[in-house]
Image (spheres, rainbow, N blue to C red):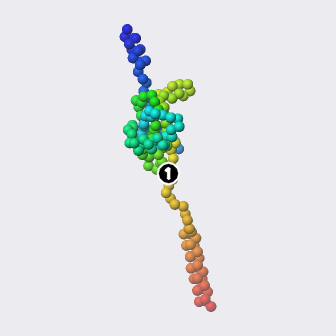
């Protein structure tokens, strides 16, 4: 009788999922910043994740916020079955924020249902603010001035010897 009760309890329990984001740029971990997770209750395939992210920010909707660790990862655990929107609230220094995207729990990979999901969002580095060289370089000006002074000096020496 105890065995039957345990089976009934395990069948009725919903399996919880996990989303782990791995933030990498050219193979190197990118730490810093925060990611916010929203559970999407009214999902339409035509929804644009960037538009939905802006709307949720404007409405100041609650979500789960987590910092990106030194190893470049952030995890959200204990998630129920559903569709989620991931938004990077604060980007790591020197990088643009990742684009918001949807992810569902569970997902099917190779005919296997998975509740633990690992995602690798695309990161882009902010280019250096160094301005391009415009105008003339200083070296040719210095060489021309030095050559001019040398020619004038030679001209003066030649005139004195005559």
Residue shown at 47%/48% (left/top)?
A: 95
Q: Residues within 10 Å of mark 1 (few under 14, many from 20)?
A: few
At which x and y percent is residue 143? Answer: 57, 73
If the image is split into quadrants, where does the C terminus sit? bottom right
In the figure, residue 159 lies in which quadrant?
Answer: bottom right
Judged from this view, the residue extending furthest toward the bottom is: 162
In the figure, residue 149 lies in which quadrant?
Answer: bottom right
Question: Which residue is more in the foreground, 128 or 46?
Answer: 46
Is 139 on the left or on the right of 63, as rendered? right
Number of marks in picture: 1
Question: Which residue is more in the foreground, 23 or 54?
Answer: 54
**Res. 81 visible in picture:** yes
Compared to residue 142, the image places residue 61 above or below, namely above
Compared to residue 94, the image places residue 75 above or below, namely above
Residue occupied by mark 1: 126
Is 47 on the left or on the right of 5, as rendered? right
At which x and y percent is residue 108? Answer: 53, 27
Residue shown at 51%/53% (left/top)?
A: 127
Secondary structure found at label 1:
loop
Question: Which residue is more in the foreground, 150 or 16?
Answer: 16
Compared to residue 127, the image places residue 73 above or below, namely above
Residue shown at 43%/18% (left/top)?
A: 11
At which x and y percent is residue 83? Answer: 47, 32
At which x and y percent is residue 98? Answer: 48, 43
In the figure, residue 38 lies in which quadrant?
Answer: top left
Residue shown at 61%/86% (left/top)?
A: 158
**Res. 116 visible in picture:** no
If the image is split into quadrants, where does the N terminus sit? top left
């Amino acid at each position: 009788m105890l065995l039957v009760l345990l089976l009934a309890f395990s069948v009725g329990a919903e399996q919880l999922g996990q989303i782990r984001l791995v933030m990498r740029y050219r193979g190197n971990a990118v730490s810093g910043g925060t990611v916010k997770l929203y559970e999407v209750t009214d999902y339409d395939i035509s929804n644009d994740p960037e538009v939905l992210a802006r709307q949720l920010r404007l409405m100041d909707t609650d979500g789960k916020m987590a910092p990106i660790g030194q190893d470049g990862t952030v995890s959200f655990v204990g998630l129920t079955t559903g569709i989620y929107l991931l938004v990077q609230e604060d980007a790591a220094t020197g990088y643009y924020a990742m684009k918001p995207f949807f992810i569902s729990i569970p997902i099917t990979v190779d005919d296997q249902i998975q509740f633990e999901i690992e995602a690798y969002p695309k990161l882009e580095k902010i280019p250096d603010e160094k301005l391009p060289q415009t105008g003339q370089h200083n070296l040719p000006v210095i060489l021309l001035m030095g050559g001019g002074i040398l020619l004038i000096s030679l001209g003066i020496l030649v005139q004195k010897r005559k």
